[in-house]
Structure formats: C-alpha cells, structure tokens
Image (cartoon, helix red, strand yellow):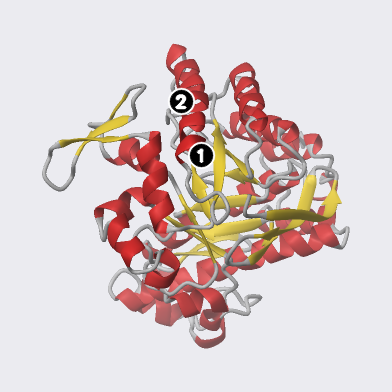
Amino acid sequence: MALRFEVLGRFNRARAARLTLPHFECQTPLFMPVGTQGTIKGLTTNQLEDIGCQIILGNTYHLALRPTSELIDELGGLHKFMNWPRALLTDSGGFQMVSLLHLADITEKGVTFQSPVDGKPMLLTPEESIQIQNRIGADIIMALDDVVKTTITGPRIEEAMYRTLRWIDRCIAAHKRPHDQNLFGIVQGGLDPVLRDICVRGLVDRNLPGYAIGGLAGGEDKDSFWRVVAQCTAALPEDKPRYVMGVGYPLDIVVCSALGADMYDCVYPTRTARFGTALVPEGVLKLKHNAMAKDTRPIDPSCACMVCKNYTRAYIHSLVTKDAMGSQLLSYHNLYYMMQLSRNLHSSIVEGKFPEFVCNFLQKMFPKGDVPEWVCNAMEVAEIDISSCCAPFRKD
C-alpha cells in the first residue's frame, strides 16, 4: 500500500484528513480537476500548483490512444511527461468506452469496442487496464468496473455489480506496482441498497488502499444520489479514503463531505468555464449575458484569485467564447473556487466549525431560504443543523 490516510478532525460523519501519496501530501476533502489528455485545458501545471491543486485526474482511455502508455512509460511516466510534481489519479478507461463509444460491448472477458483510430474491434480487459495504468504511473489507479447508468434497472445492475467484484480480483492479480501505486475498487449496484451493500462488503474484504463510489452523477434524482452516498460512506472503512466519482457541483461536494466522503472529480468547473460560466458563492455567473458588457466589478469580489484581482466582468464578457483567453481565465477562476471550497471544508472540520460553514454556504446560495428538500434530508442524516438557513417547507 502506497498511501497513508490520517483523519485530523471530524464533525459527525464529515472528516478532514491528511492523505499522503507517493508524490504529494494532500488535505481532504479535495476536488480533482480532470486533465483528459494529461492537461487541464488552457492551464499550465505551474498555474495549477499556484491555485492549490493537489491531484489531477488523467483519462487512461485517451492517454492510451494518444500519446500511448508505452511512450509515456518510455519517457519516464506521466508525472515527468506533463511536468506535474504532485499527485495523479488515472481512471480505468471503462467509463469512456461506454459513454463515448456506443459500440462498446461488455462481456466477462472485458470491454469490446471499435477502435476510433481504424475501426477494428479491440478488447480492454481488467488486466490490460491495470497494465496501461502501471505504465502511466499515477499515484492512484482505478479498477476496471462494469459501468451501467444508474437510470437502468433490473438484472443488468446485479450482473454488473457481481462482475465488478470478479474483475477486482483480476485487477489485483495484474497490479505489478502496489508499492508505488494505489489500486482503488469501485462500489457499484445502481440505486439498489442490497446490491450496494454486497458490493461494499466484497470490496472491503479485499482490503484495498481506498474505495470509490461509482455509477452516480449520471442522471439519477438527487434524493437517490445522496442516499447511495450516505449508505456507502457509512459502510466503508474509517481509515481509508472514499472517492465519489464524477461529482463536481459545489453543493453536491458540500453534501457528500457532510456524509463522510473525501474525494471528488468532474469536468464541470472547466467545461462550464468554456461555455462562459463562472462559479461564485451565489451559484453561477453567466459572463455571456449582455448585462456584463459594462460591469467593471470582478467575477467575485470576495475571491482572491489572479483573475478576480486583475480583470473585470466586462473584459471577460468581451472575450468569452470568442477568444481562448476567456475560457482560460474562467477555468483558472473556477478551479481556484473549487480549491478554496476544498480548503474551507478541510479547515472548518478541523476547527470544529463545520455546521457554520455549511450554513454560510447555503445562505449565500439560497438567500431566500429555499434550500432543496434533498439537501435538508441529507443534512438531517449527517446531523448538521441547518434550520437557521433552511426555510423550504414554510407554507406562508
């Protein structure tokens, strides 16, 4: 096992920890930006360090296609290749195949798909996914799982969950670098609490360095979403990191952290930046709107980032979607916002002020007190009193 996970503070289910990985000592809760091809679009690795990014996620599928895992390995691994001194996490490649290639077919052997390069059928097995990730060299590598959208029901969900458990053993057997790279298992089971429970217990029996909650953030309703997270975090070990895959909305991260999750990743902050949207404490700010054309304020007057210190909404409005600089500046601000959110979650838990942080966060986002019912329900389970900022059920 190539990680240490030390809980530094708790508030009920929420925890703040020090996660020590081969390349970096991280503070959780933490958000990981997605650098598909070994790059966060429009930002340099120096900028990512400046804003406090701790772990970058790389997509195994895209890296294996270009520039290939063999080349990355030959050139000294992905850290060296992309000049990133801090931690990296790679996904297994399975999700991309199922989401990008509607031609993917999953069997017991692995995922069969048509090569986007020459159209020939190709097979990604659990063994090959691990071999590719061993060559890429990330601090955390993910098991190949059988990916099913949560909106699907019936026997396919059960089949995928049991296959995910069978494949984890193939991943463990294939993993040649357990002292440099941490293999995380992925809890599947759709929205079925019985299947989720079987999967959690099966993975915990394998005593892995960390665990991910997969198959969410794919269109299920929020009430189902938080309940699966709450169930899984309650059943996973206290002394190992818990990673909710594909979660990037700030509200979702605050709720999941209250329920005991530690790590998150999503393309949302950078993708939404490219569409001209900034993340702010009130929610979002759409810089494309004509109202921004003469607005000389920064994106967020309370933000200390380089963009908010130097540029106006009017300037960014003039660039957005017309000039690459617009999406670069917004990506920088949005990731700064996410890193600051992570730091605030960590420090508020350590200092015993987590409920105050949550209430303050919700008050800014829902000034009228119309906090969504699912958030109120989740906070009740997390034992965080948000009554001071939550007035959704008043009948007046």
Q: Is residue 146 left or right of residue 103?
A: right
Tell me where residue 93 sits by quadrant: top left
Q: Residues within 10 Å of mark 2 (few under 14, many from 20)?
A: some
Kind of residue sitting beneath label 1:
Ala
**Mark 1 to mark 2: distance in Å?**
10 Å
Earlier sequence position, callout 1 versus callout 2 = 2
Mark 1–mark 2 CB contact (< 8 Å): no
Residue 346 image offset from top left, x and y in percent: 75, 61
Q: Residues within 10 Å of mark 1 (few under 14, many from 20)?
A: some
Q: Any mark on residue 322, and which? A: none
**Is residue 192 shown above or below 230?**
above
- The residue tagged 2 is 151
Q: Is residue 211 left or right of residue 56?
A: right
Residue 3 image offset from top left, x and y in percent: 65, 55
Residue 70 image offset from top left, x and y in percent: 29, 57
Kindly identify the residue that appears in the image at 37 percent across and 57 percent down: 36
Tell me where residue 256 sits by quadrant: top right
Asked whether residue 298 is in view, the answer is no
Kindly identify the residue that appears in the image at 56 percent across and 85 percent down: 309
Residue 214 image offset from top left, x and y in percent: 53, 36
Kindly identify the residue that appears in the image at 56 percent across and 79 percent down: 50
- The residue tagged 1 is 217
Kind of residue sitting beneath label 2:
Thr
Q: Is residue 7 left or right of residue 264?
A: right
Quadrant containing the C terminus in the rendered view: top right
Mark 2: secondary structure: loop
